[in-house]
Structures are given as C-alpha cells and as structure tokens.
Image (cartoon, grey):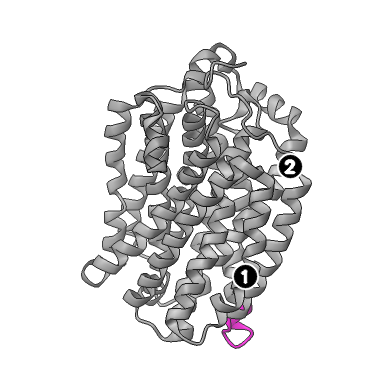
Amino acid sequence: MRLIRKFTGLTAAQRHAYFAALGGWTLDAFDFFIFIVSLHAIGTDFHVNLTAVSFGITLTLAMRPVGALLFGALAEKYGRRPILIANVLSYALIELASAFAPDLTVLLVLRAAFGLAMGGEWGVGAALAFETLPAEGRGFFSGLLQEGYVLGFLLAALVSRLFFATVGWRGLFVIGALPALLVLYIRRGVAESPAWLEGRHRRRASLRDLGRIVAANAPALLYMIGLMALFNAFSHGSQDLYKPFLLQRYGLGGAQADDVLMLMNVGALFGGMLFGALSERIGRRKAIACAALLALPVIPLWTYAPTVPLAALGAFLMQFMVQGAWGIVPAHLNELSPPGVRAVLPAFAYQFGNFAMALLAPLQSSIAAHHGHDLGTVLAWTIGLVAVTLSAATLLGREAKSAAFLGATGER
C-alpha cells in the first residue's frame, strides 16, 4: 500500500520518467547478467577456463566509465530523453551480436562494446528520473531505482532457468535483445527532464567547458570514485562468481543454481527498498554503513553453509545487505553533484569505480585456483574487508540529503 501511495502522489510525467529510468537500468542489468549466468557454459563451449571467460566482466566494467563520459556529455548537450533512447538501442543490439560470436576473442570485444553502452545508461536515466521527481521521498525512489540492477539479475536467472536447456547460452543473448522495445515506450510516453529544459541554455557547453566544470569539482569526484570502487567491490565481489561457487561447492545443476540466484535477488530487492526508505529517516551515510556492517555476520552462512537451503538463506540475507547499501547510491550521488554535471559526475564516478574493480572477478578466480579452488573463502574475505572499509569511507564523507534539484521542485 505504501508503494502505491508513493506512485499515486506523482504526476503522469514523473511516473513515466521514473519508469523509463527503471526499465532502462533493469534491462541493461539483464543483458549484463545474461553473460554472468552463462560463464560456465561459454567456457565449456569455447574450451577455456573460468578465469579466461570472466575477463569479459573485466572488459565490460573497464569500458563503463568511457560510456558514462560519452553518453553523459551528450545528455548534457542534447537532453536526457534522446540519449537514453540511443543508449537502450546500443546495448540491445550489442547483446544480439554477442549471440553470434564465433570465438571467445570476438565475444570479449563485444562485451567491451557492451560496457560502453552500459556505462552511459545509469547516469542518463538517473538524471532524467531525479530531475523530474520531487525531492520528498527521493531516498525511497532511489532504493527502488537501483533495484533495477537486481531485477535485471533476477530476470536473467529466471530466463536462464526457463530457457537455457532449450536455447543454450546463445539463445539467451538473442532474448537479451528484447530491451530494444523499451524505446517505443520512451518515445511515446516520456518527456524531457524539466531541469534540463530550464537550464539548457547553460548546457550548450563544449567538452572543454564540461572538463572545467568537472575539474572544479575534483575533490567531490575523487571521493565519489573511491566510494564507488568500494561499492562495486561489494556487489561484484559477492555476485559475479556466486553461481560458479554453487556449482563447485554443492555440485548443483545449472537450473538449481539459478533457483538460488533468483532467491538471493528477491532478498536484494527488499533490502534496496527498505534501506532506501530508511535513509529518509536516518540519513544516507548512516543507512549505507548500517547495511554494510550487517553483512559481516551473514558471511559464515553465505559461504560455509553445510546444506543448499542454508546457503540459499545466506545468499538471500547477504544480498539484502549488499543491495540495501546500494539502494541509496542514486540519490546520494545525485545530491552530492552540482546541476551542470548531474548526468556526468555521478555516472562517471559510478563507472570509474567499476573500472577500478574491473579485475576483481578474474583475481578472485585466480586466487581460488591457487588455493584448492576454494572460492568460498575468497568470497568471504572479499566481502569482509570491503564491508568494513565501505562503512568507514561513507561515514567520513559528506551528505546532502533532500538537496533541491533545479526544476524538480520549483526551488533554486
């Protein structure tokens, strides 16, 4: 009921802008996680090990900051809506091309190109949403928006569970091209950001001008990059190799592992919404630190559970905390950013944080391979160290909860 009340209080334009951003991020994540759930199958098909295939994750993450800068700069100049359309079409078409990769090298090149498109979507979509929404309830909407990433993971696991046995990993990538249909909705129902329209005369800036604005905000940018590196280690370090971990430790089949992935993403969905709403009461920083620290007592159940049902419970609780912290990120980063670079600064910080952690999955896999293929211990140490560091870095930063956005509330 509370969720319904939140949305009924919005205007039609605000709802459409929000659903466009949520849909774009959900389907972007869906296409990313199609690759994640197919790691083992791709390796088997191309006769390579897990470390070699997981390098595709590295290339995707490494290219995301480039995409954030490219699409973010275009969104500052031409508007959020048309660039969001270009973004969605880009990642959908690259996903389709991935289905026909003749070898691992071509597939890795396509995953790098996918990273370029994926890197742009989050910042453009978040700017469109939060410049259109009212400041009140921004934490709640942030939590739900970020859970588009979780919904994408959940959808990828579900599609894999239902169709992998019939269509294989290549068929999953073909299904991953369906997000292109979202463009029809954006073209018909979504208006341009009122904040961008109100300030567009100032946004017709060159890349050099944009560079000067970013340089003027260098301290904030550096802090956000460091923070997002930790956030990305928190999510990718707990998610990307969890299916191979389940297959290895418990000897599960692919469908059984997908069931666990779906359950853990349900936990992530609830965690993001709960902590996003909680951040409205106790502040962004305290809510993030609380979620990160609560992940610590879950680690033993998550990686050392003696049975699959207990491991599934641990996965549910772990992602409840991981995505609980993540749910606050869109609002927190946008509130810390000035209006002139709101489609660039948060996105670049987010995606450069991805770049900083781009080698995490191959590193985890390689360390495990040299220590008896014990992925569980590697996952446990990763999350333990990151959770403590993330909570400390967040509490040491500043906060701008409910800061007014130009055009979003009528305030300046």
Q: Going 30% across and 27% down the picture, which residue do you hit?
A: 189
Circles 2 and 1, Cβ within 8 Å, touching? The answer is: no
Q: Which mark is residue 233?
A: none
Q: In front of the other: label 2 or label 1?
A: 2
Q: Percent x, y for residue 231?
A: 62, 54
Residue farthest front in this picture: 1
Q: Give the SS element for disc 2.
A: helix
**322 sits left or right of 96 in the view:** right
**84 sits left or right of 305 in the view:** left
Estimate how packed mark 1 is, as few (under 14), some (14 to 19) or many (20 or more) residues with alpha carbons within 10 Å.
some
Give the labeled residue for mark 2: 222
Q: Percent x, y for residue 382?
A: 65, 69
Q: Going 59% across and 30% down the picture, which residue do you hit?
A: 342
Out of 381 and 205, give the one closest to the viewer: 381
Give the labeled residue for mark 1: 363
Q: Percent x, y for residue 129?
A: 47, 32
Q: CA distance from mark 2 to mark 1?
A: 24 Å
Magenta residues (range): 367-375
**99 sits left or right of 358 in the view:** left
Q: Give the SS element for disc 1.
A: helix
* On-image quarter of the N terminus: top left
In terms of sequence position, does the residue under pointer 2 or pointer 1 come before the other?
2
Q: Looking at the image, can residue 394 be seen?
A: yes
Which three-letter amino acid code belongs to the residue tagged 2? Leu
Residue 371 lies in magenta, yes or no?
yes
